[in-house]
Image (cartoon, rainbow, N blue to C red):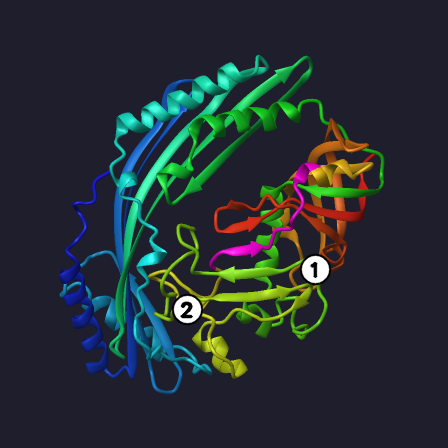
Amino acid sequence: MNDTAFMKRSDIEAIADHALSRALRLGASGADLAYSASCGSSLSLLDGEIEECSSGVSARIGVRTIISDGRQGIASGGRLDAASVDAPVEWSLHNALASEPEEGVMLYDGPFVSDPELDVEDLAIRGIKHEDRMRYCLEMTETARGKDSRVRSVREAGYGNGWGESFFANTNGLSGWESCSSASCSVLVLAEEGEFSEMGGYGKGALRMDEIDTVKIAERAVKDTVSALGGAPVATGAYTVMIEPMAAAALVGVIGGLFCATDVQKGRSMLRGKLGQNVASSCVSITDDGRIPWKPGTASMDCEGVPTQRTELIKNGIAAAFLYDLQSAAKDGVKTTGNCSRGTGSLPDVGTHNLILDPGRESPEDLQSCIADGIYITEFMGLHTIDSVSGDFSLGAKGLRIEKGVLTVPVSGITIASNLLDLMKKITALGSDLTFSGSVAAPTVVIENVVIAGK
């Protein structure tokens, strides 16, 4: 991985000043500019042989222009010099003139606040070389092969690392830089036992190199895959469901998205009109926090230059707040929560930072020991099909049977059909094992009286 192709920061700042000044000269009432550059390398092995090896560097710049009546436009480009950036400025203004006026379109006029404690750049990651990636991938391959005799093939052992930086500036005088690093690895194995076969795996990404243990990841990939061999449906009925943290995090990610104000305002969220109401069990509290050091959703500022913050979305089961960018906040007459999300070629929208379902105090082992007749869910299928307006869903799932507090036989081919609000209100316990999956974190979740369709 080579970041020497990145332009000097002083050169980017000069280009930004040129672009923003030109936007004002051409008639915009305001403008902002977003620059993003990244470089990364990845390697993957198939049964110990190189299947894919790649490296790349990319950089883009985007300009948004605003007209005084609330019209806005965006344009971006990959040529980074003062002459070439004139085109995105002109196209951005052209797109703004062709758009319709909108309420609340504005620029942030506060200062850029950099917090060095929100460090998300590990210099050790930038030093990883091809031979290091090869060593990690071979280590994962050998670990997976030797962990269980039922592993027939290590379909993928992959490792990737990257680094990037971004710059934001607007015509109100705000400007600031941020940088980050990341590394990830994953293992995919094929396991067979008698007439049964199962393909499965496990992976993890992190901003710090010391948070990734390749041996443990390979062992987890094998454990999860072989434990699913021979899975079969359970009898249709009501069960206590215990959800593994990574699967629970996927569900929390869907729930968090329902708090984005732009979707609420457009009637695309079932939480519209429900602030202050009970939407979950009293043991449920969910926060969005952009200021947790070394987490993927962390940043000093959002994509409009607004400082990030911690926002309580659900507090003890009560819907407490929505997430806002500047425009959506203006529409509701509230302050932005610093949750603007955008790319260099897209207009501002609302997104999440680090979504967290607050953990409980009991260990997952203690929670499991209290379940006489249940299902331990390790994976949901079809989470993207949840109806965000009604909350209705029908999800496939797989996992393990829980009988008298003990994990027994693998379970697959089951379906859970319910309503998201009803499901959240049936949560009875949360484990102490808070686990991050990307920028979403959740512990083990226990839900009572869940109807499961099986055989």
Give the extent of the magenta segment: 353-365
Q: What residue type is labelled 2?
A: Pro
Q: Name the residue under label 1.
A: 391
Q: Tag 1: residue type?
A: Gly
Location of residue 426 (image quadrant)? bottom right
Q: In this view, does 127 lie to the left or right of 335?
A: left
Task: Using the rendered image of the protein, determine whether residue 11 is visible from the camera's viewpoint.
Answer: yes
Q: Can residue 259 be seen in this view?
A: no
Q: Is label 2 in a helix, a strand or a loop? A: loop
Q: Say which residue appears at 17% left-offset and 59% top-offset.
A: 9
Q: Is residue 7 above or below residue 47?
A: below
Circle nearer the N terminus (2, 1): 2
Residue 116 falls in image quadrant: bottom left
Query: As displayed, is residue 193 above or below residue 140?
Result: above
Residue 46 in picture, x, y percent from top left: 42, 21
Disc 2 designates what residue?
348
224 up-or-down from 71: above or below = above
Image quarter in which the C terminus is found: top right
Q: Does the magenta stretch include residue 361?
A: yes
Q: Position of residue 359 (x, y in %)?
A: 61, 51
Taking the magenta stretch, the answer to whether it contains residue 10 is no
Q: Residue at x 35, y 73 (%)?
A: 73
Q: Is residue 107 above or below residue 431?
A: below
What residue appears at the point 75 percent right and 36 percent down from the top-left corner? Answer: 369
> Which residue occupies the foreground of this view, 39 or 335?
335
Residue 403 percent coordinates (x, y): 80, 31
* Alpha-carbon span between mark 2 and mark 1: 26 Å
